[in-house]
Amino acid sequence: MPFRFLSLMSSALSSLIVERIRNTGPLTVAQFVDNALYHEELGYYARAGRRSGRDGDFFTSVDLGPMFGELLEAQFEEMWRVMSGGGAVGEPATDARFDLVEAAAGNGRLARDILDHAAVRAPRFYQAIRLHLVERSPLARAEQAETLGPHAQRLATGSAELPAGVRGVIYANELLDALAPHLVVMRDGGLREVYVDAGDDRLVTREGPPSSPRIEAYLAAVGARLEPGWFAEVNLAAADWIRTAGSCLDCGFLMIIDYGHEASRLYSSSHSTGTLTTYRRHASEHRDEGPGWLMEPGERDITSHVDLTGIALAGREAGLQLLGVIDQTYFLLGLGLAERLLENGSDAPLDVKRRLALKTLLLPGGMGSTHKVMVFAKALQCPTLRGLSLGGRVT
Ligand SMILES: C[S@@+](CC[C@H](N)C(=O)[O-])C[C@H]1O[C@@H](n2cnc3c(N)ncnc32)[C@H](O)[C@@H]1O
């Protein structure tokens, strides 16, 4: 490999990627991103147990403190009541097991916040919980038992794969945006796919025919009509993950929290340059020499918006019933976020940290409006859940 290449690319993973391209040809963007994020030794997520937070590259709702987990706990407890025959408010008839399956569990912080709250507020629910943490990063998985502390005894499985036969809830915060999408562009002659190739001194993008007939089939199924010049991501991995989750769920709920839009908006002029982007130290990057996501693979986060329409379709194909799609703000308000504010009392000012967390969770433009919550059910007749009680509000 030319020395110039290494000096410009400056990441250990780039030389492996270049070697692979020289041996087998250009990679789809999906293959490139999967390598950049999840290569077993050098991938962005493989090299650290935690990537978010003030010292990381981006924030998720989990970084804002325990309140997010505490509110989710209220939703999961209600799901447990519904499934145990106690109805939305009555005491459950049995203490049947409840599988609490977190996918993209990272080092277990969100699960710990949920269990901390359940242990104090809902001890019977707490006793029913069988916790499963599903996480692809081995380093993050290795930190889970320590993060869980006394709750580690509730941990039934910790793995990279979803468990089968789930009776309870499978949930994921910011998983689907971190799965690797194909990148396409519409040209006058028809749909083209974007590939990553090795140029003389850097990785470059090239266009070619779609790598799979599934890509055009996906766009047709969600009703996307791209105009010449528009770029778009097609996240087959996200749809496949939903189908797998649907088949792993015997009875209960699937809850997805992520940022994204309906296909009619995602595949429109407002997103015609695509949404694939990269974060490092809380800033999105684009450089003159090419898109930021192509630079220094393994050193930075790569993410794209979720197509809510494609996720709903995949859920239906997996035998799931879509109960609702709602802005995270309204979901959390339905679970008592406003009451929590009042609980503090007017003469007991919230501490600065909590106030900032609430602002980010609630205000327009913050995570509350960019993030959506989708809830599916399987093999259940169920009433309106509290989190969905404020209606299907999507902005
Ligand atoms: C953006 S982070 C979100 C982490 C955490 N849920 C949060 O909200 O802070 C995405 C996480 O998904 C994990 N991940 C990616 N693909 C996965 C898969 N198929 N199953 C489980 N975890 C996965 C990554 O390793 C990473 O830890």
Image (cartoon, grey):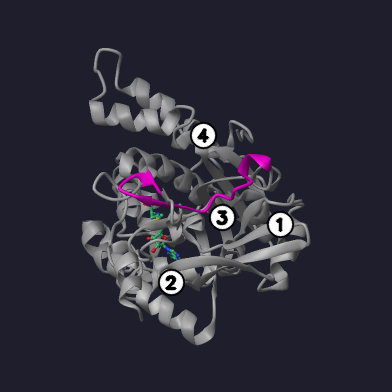
Q: Which residues are magenta?
A: 269-285
Report the image quarter containing ligand 1: bottom left
Residue type at mark 1? Answer: Met
Q: CA distance from mark 1 to mark 4?
A: 30 Å
Earlier in the chain: of badge 1 and badge 3, it is 1
- Residue behind mark 1: 186
The label shown at residue 35 is 2
Earlier in the chain: of badge 3 and badge 4, it is 3
Q: Are marks 3 and 4 in contact (CB under 8 Å)?
A: no
- Residue behind mark 4: 369
Earlier in the chain: of badge 2 and badge 3, it is 2
Image height check: is 47 above or below 252?
Answer: below
Q: Residues within 10 Å of mark 3 (few under 14, many from 20)?
A: many
Q: Nearer the viewer, mark 1 or mark 4?
A: 1
Q: Quadrant of residue 145?
A: bottom left
Residue type at mark 3? Answer: Phe
Earlier in the chain: of badge 2 and badge 4, it is 2
Q: CA distance from mark 1 to mark 3?
A: 37 Å
Q: Are marks 1 and 4 in contact (CB under 8 Å)?
A: no
- Residue behind mark 3: 253
Image height check: is 262 above or below 300?
Answer: above
Q: SS of the residue at dot 3?
A: strand
Residue type at mark 2? Answer: Asn
